[in-house]
Amino acid sequence: MWFLGLGLLLVALKFFEVGPVAQWSWLVVLSPFGLALAWWAWADWSGYTKRKAMEREEVRRQDRIDRQRSQLGMLNSRSRDRRR
């Protein structure tokens, strides 16, 4: 996501001819988009994206379980320690 934001910033600076970016070639200005594409391709290929999604789901699941146990008065010290 950082590459995408950087690319948008550089395109805006190039388009409005602000600072030294106005003199840079379009290839340099557009290169963050290529880096973003490479990052997303690698993240999908390596399983990084899926692994992060599974970690978020696991945290949400555990929070939901802990919240339900707390409401029932069943939250024990082991459940609290696991969240830290």
Image (cartoon, rainbow, N blue to C red):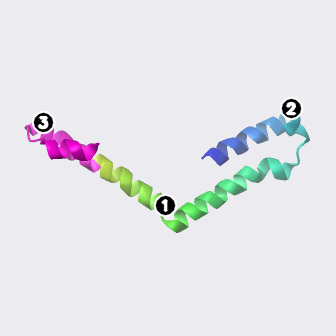
Mark 1 crowdedness (10 Å alpha carbons): few <14, some 14-19, many ≥20: few
Amino acid at pointer 1: Tyr
Between 15 and 64, the one lying in front of the other is 64
The range drawn in magenta is: 61-84
Q: Residue at x 87, y 36 (%)?
A: 20
Amino acid at pointer 2: Gly
Of all residues, the one furthest to the left in this rendering is 73
Residue located beneath label 1 in the image: 48
Q: Nearer the viewer, mark 1 or mark 3?
A: 1
Residue 49, percent from left and from top = 48, 58
Q: Is residue 5 visible?
A: yes
Q: Indicate the secondary structure of the residue bearing disc 1.
A: helix
Q: Residue at x 77, y 40 (%)?
A: 10
Whichever of callouts 2 and 3 sits on the residue coming sooner in the sequence is 2
Cα distance in 3D space between marks 2 and 3 = 58 Å
Mark 2 crowdedness (10 Å alpha carbons): few <14, some 14-19, many ≥20: few
Q: Residue at x 12, y 42 (%)?
A: 76
Number of the label disc, if any, that sits on residue 19: 2
Whichever of callouts 2 and 1 sits on the residue coming sooner in the sequence is 2
Amino acid at pointer 3: Gln
Mark 3 crowdedness (10 Å alpha carbons): few <14, some 14-19, many ≥20: few
Question: Which image quarter: residue 18?
Answer: top right
**Does the residue at mark 2 contact the one at mark 3 (Cβ under 8 Å)?**
no
Q: Is residue 17 visible?
A: no
Whichever of callouts 1 and 3 sits on the residue coming sooner in the sequence is 1
Residue 17, percent from left and from top = 87, 34
Residue 23, percent from left and from top = 91, 41
Residue located beneath label 3 in the image: 71
Cα distance in 3D space between marks 2 and 1 = 37 Å
